[in-house]
Structure formats: C-alpha cells, structure tokens
Amino acid sequence: MDVEQTTSTTKERERLTRERVIDAALSVMDAEGLDAVSMRRVAREVGVEAMSLYNHVRDKDDLLQGVCERIMSSFEFPATSGEWVDRAKAGAGEWRRLLQAHPDVMRIFAETHGPAPSSPESLLPTEFALRLFMEAGLSDRDAVQAFHAFGGYIQGFVMMEAGSMKERHEEHFLGAAIPSEEFPALAAASRYWADCDADEQFEFGLDLLIRGLQARVAAGASTPSRTE
C-alpha cells in the first residue's frame, strides 16, 4: 500500500463529524478558492464518498453557512474596557484580519441564498458591533446603518488590498505621463500613490467614519428608534 492509499485509509477510519466536514471545506476554500468547494471535493478531503457528507450537512448551502459560522466564531474580541474609539478600531481591525485570512467568505455573504449564520458564537461579533454603536449614542436604527457603513468599508478595503492597491495605482498613475493642464489634481497627487501603506490607509478611512459617527451623535442627528 503506497503513502497516498495509507493516508486515505487513515482518514476513512477517523470519525466523521459536522465540524470536521466544515473544517475541510474551509481548508479547501482558503487553499483553492470558493469555486473549488464542492461536496465531492470536500468528501475527497476527508477521505469518504460524497454521499457520506449528507449525514452531517443538508446541502452545499448548509456547508457554506457552516463555514461562515466557523469564521465568525474565531473573531477575537478587544478588551471591553478602555476608550470607545480604541475598541472600535480594534474591532474593525479584527474584522479586517478575518477577511484577509478568508477573503472568499465575502463571496459567500453575497452569493448564498440559505439562512444567515445563526449559531450563538457566529452572532457574537454582530452583537459586539451593534452594542458598540449604541454605546456611542446611536439609536437602534442608526446602529444598523453604521454596521452596514463600517462593514462595507472594511470589506471593500480588503478587496482593494487583495487587488494589489499600491501596484495598480503606481502602474496607472506613476507610469503614465499626466498632463497637468488637463488633470491638475492627478498631476499634483501622483507622486503620493507610492506612499499608499495599507495599514495607514485603513486607519485613515476608519478615522473618517468614526469622526462622522461622533459628529452625528454630537449634533443629535441620530434617527430615533421605533420604540423611542
């Protein structure tokens, strides 16, 4: 028996569980991309026939929901004490870290049609964020709006990072002769594209969002909740 056959036999002898199936799907997604995740591919990863997976997941949507829940449950919460701004930045940074580690999860959020992740562990990051926004002084309704605004910014930024933000900017603007008479702003700013440090850019955008939130609360512009 060769090494590959021995490995397969060992996997078959391991007890198959929902957790193991989901871990295998997450491993395939991170290594090969979301398009590679199929019931057959995951079954091969754990060393069983595809039909065996249906004892643990209903279908592919259920499998992908489990992947989302696994990722969300790995969220590392910042300390509950300390300044609000510091906790908000730490939470946003952790969400960015998760998406960097598992970028294809954003496609799952956008493309799957099954129920949203609902395990207690997977809901805790959303609970944390909403509480943080309410603590800052936003109404229940505006806390949801802020959740979408911050979440959209973080997801968009990670997508931009994955597309090699700095290299694209350098190629498009530094490598081209920009007529200053026609594009004075681009000509003036072009030399700064090379200074696009991702962490600095992320903090800059996050500061803008946080200051906008604080200004809204200070102005008393938060939309009252339905129950208020």
Image (spheres, rainbow, N blue to C red):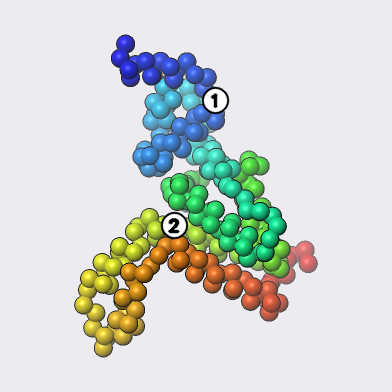
| Towards the viewer: 198 or 28 | 198
State whether residue 226 appears in this view.
Answer: yes
At a point 68% along the width and 74% down the height, the residue shown is: 217
Query: How far apart are the two marked residues, 1 and 2, measured between alpha carbons?
Result: 32 Å
| Residue under the point 55% across and 40% down | 70
Which residue occupies the extreme top position in the image? 1
Q: What element carries label 1?
A: loop
Residue situated in front as seen by the camera: 207 or 41: 207
If the image is split into quadrants, where does the C terminus sit?
A: bottom right
Q: Residue 189 carries which label?
A: none
Q: Amino acid under label 2?
A: Val
Q: Are marks 1 and 2 in contact (CB under 8 Å)?
A: no
Residue at horizontal 50 percent and vertical 49 percent from the top: 98
Q: In this view, does 163 lie above or below 216?
A: above
Q: Point out residue 163 in the picture as x, y percentages from the top left corner.
A: 35, 57
Please state which amino acid type lies under the numbered disc 1: Thr
Q: Nearer the viewer, residue 2 or 72?
A: 2
Please give left or right for residue 53 compared with residue 162 in the image.
right
Provide the residue designation for mark 1.
17
Q: Which residue lies furthest to the bottom in this view?
A: 181
Is 139 left or right of 97, judged from the image as shown?
A: right
User: Is the residue 110 above or below the residue 188 in the image?
Assistant: above
Where residue 158 is drawn, which disc sits there? 2
In terms of depth relative to the viewer, which is nearer, 143 or 158?
158
